[in-house]
Image: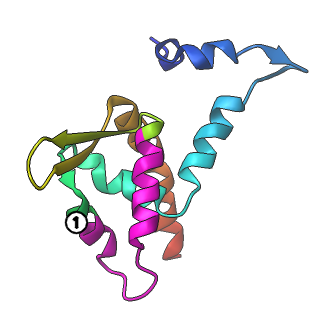
Amino acid sequence: MSKINEYPSIVKCTHKKNGFPCFIPAQRVLNLVGKKWSIQLINVLSNGRKVRYNEIRELLHKGWKKNKISDATLSARLSELSKEGVLIRDVHPEIPPKVEYSLSEKGQDLAEALQPLIDWTIKTCHE
């Protein structure tokens, strides 16, 4: 079965104009993943487990001596991806509060779709 049936908002945009389908949903996704650190963040969370903020930051910092992700950028990306339904933000009512992040089913689908791009990037980086 086609994934398009799972996302009703996409179905609304499949009309053809000038012989081409509407690319509004694709543009929205590209704008989201095109933001700095979004693809890396999705990739880090693609293992399926729940991860806390500090561990995410540590995982994103691995291998970087400079240009590490700032707390403001990490918070912004987590918020944006959560708002779009790509991430699940799980808050445990404890003191201090415990917050864990994981990919939603939509996020897992996106991570799988991004994997060929990541593989291609790694391959072409070393040519």
In the depicted structure, whether residue 102 falls above or below residue 13: below
In terms of depth relative to the viewer, which is nearer, 90 or 61? 90
Task: Give, as a three-letter code, the residue at label 1.
Answer: Asn
Residue 118 can be seen in this image? yes
Circle 1: element type: helix
The image quadrant where one finds the N terminus is top left
Q: Position of residue 102 (x, y in %)?
A: 26, 43
Q: Position of residue 58 (x, y in %)?
A: 25, 71
Instruction: Determine the residue positioned at 45% across, 38% down.
Output: 83
**Residue 31 inside the magenta-drawn segment:** no
Quarter of the figure with residue 13:
top right
Residue 39 can be seen in this image? no
Q: Residues within 10 Å of mark 1 (few under 14, many from 20)?
A: few
In the depicted structure, whether residue 25 falls above or below residue 16: below
Q: Which residue is mark 1?
A: 54
**Residue 80 inside the magenta-drawn segment:** yes
Residue lying at the far front of the rendered structure: 95
**Left of 18 or right of it: where is 90?**
left
In terms of depth relative to the viewer, which is nearer, 25 or 127? 25
Instruction: Determine the residue positioned at 37% across, 82% down.
Output: 64
Quarter of the figure with residue 49:
top left
| Range of magenta residues | 57-82
Instruction: Determine the residue positioned at 49% across, 15% down.
Output: 2
Instruction: Determine the residue positioned at 12% across, 56% down.
Output: 96
